[in-house]
Amino acid sequence: MRLSHIDRMRAIAVLCMVEVHTAAIIPPEGVTVGHPAAFAAAAFGGMAAPMFVAISGWGIHMSATRRAADPEHDAGRWLSWLLPRVLLLSLCQLLVNLLLNADRGGRFEWHTPGVLTLLAIAALLAPALIRLSMRGRGMLMLLMVAAPLAIGDAVGPDWSWWERVDSQGTSEWLARLLWNGTYPAVPWLGYALLGSIIHDLADQPSVRERNIAIGLAATTFTMFIAVLEDIDWALTSGDAVLTFFPANTPFLIVSGTFVLLAHRLLEGAESSGGEPALGDRLAVLEPAGRITLTIYVVHFAVLGAVASMMEGEPRLGLVTAFALTIAHTLVWIPLAIWHQRHIPNLSFEALLSRIS
């Protein structure tokens, strides 16, 4: 069963990722890390990636659970479901890295693990994770939240971006994949586990709302810490209470709370048989939500071309950069509508459906 609010949440997540990636490729002149515009762009990114992984985890868990309920779904059928997903996601990550490669003014090395390799790991683990109770997955999620405290300096808290996306040899590449890359399995699998829990709590909104209240209280506490310690509340990286690279424990708590909150706000009464929030007024987002992997990969082709043209050129002015960033973000909405009407079978999602 397709749920409208899930498609809308997927669309918002991928569009926010388009926005933050575009802002990174065409940063305006004179905007520093502390500028309100930079903070706003980083906030979208800080919300988007956790939401993207959590909703992907929701989908992986739903699909795996449905297959596990089929008594005829044996080991061979598990492989026919797993291998295409892991292979396609890994190949798409490689394609993203090549489209926005550092050699052409981009941000990635060709071998950089990223969010798509993270989702490949989530898919690979799904047959085992669905056998855990919701309580068991909840405990595992909390371990992921606490993991940055245990790993300590191994996550590279002072690393530059280029140290985080590069690796020398197999052991360093595995370290980037598992605990100190851009989207390492530990702790980012916690969001996939959160998505599975959201799925299982579909008919228990009061439990989710209680967890949101606890998370908002914890979020407020992190703000008080920032004020008392006189440090930034949130930065992409550096000295702040919340950091994205690497994802620290306060960031995991706060972003996880906003994932729960966004889901609850978009859900409306749909899970109980009613309408999603705002009825049909957000239906325009649903086509984009059905092809998030395609949008994620293809928008890097656009950004790769822009990065190549901008290499060595002066930065754009604030208004121009802002307008281009918003335009590139919003254009995917009508493009997705056109795609679903005319060429719905030409996408990575359709390819995965055919080969699974």
Image (cartoon, grey):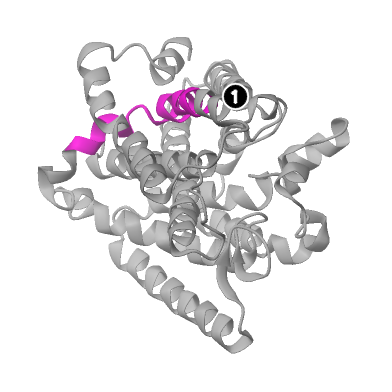
Q: Is residue 299 magenta?
A: yes
In this view, 269 is above or below 294? below
Question: Within 10 Å of the Cα at label 1, are there few (<14), some (14-19), or many (20+) other Cα atoms?
Answer: many
Residue 311 vs residue 195, the one in the foreground: 311
Q: Residue at x 68, y 34 (%)?
A: 113
Q: Which residue is mark 1?
A: 86
Residue 169 vs residue 253, the one in the foreground: 169
Residue 168 vs residue 292, the one in the foreground: 168
Q: Is residue 309 magenta?
A: no
- Magenta: main secondary structure equals helix
User: What range is drawn magenta here?
Assistant: 284-304
Label 1 SS = helix
The amino acid type of the residue labelled 1 equals: Val
Residue 146 horizontal/vertical position (percent)? 67, 65
Q: Quadrant of residue 257?
A: bottom left
Work out which quarter of the rendered image holds the N terminus and state it. top left
Q: Residue furthest front?
A: 314
Q: Quadrant of residue 169?
A: top right
Q: Is residue 122 visible?
A: no
Q: Quadrant of residue 10?
A: top left
In this view, 61 is above or below 351? below
Q: Residue at x 60, y 47 (%)?
A: 189
Residue 120 horizontal/vertical position (percent)? 59, 31
Residue 31 horizontal/vertical position (percent)? 51, 56
In this view, 65 is above or below 140? above
Q: Residue at x 59, y 69 (%)?
A: 250
Residue 78 horizontal/vertical position (percent)? 55, 22
Q: How many marks?
A: 1
Q: Is residue 79 visible?
A: yes
In this view, 223 is above or below 165? below
Q: Left or right: where does residue 353 sit relative to residue 180? A: left
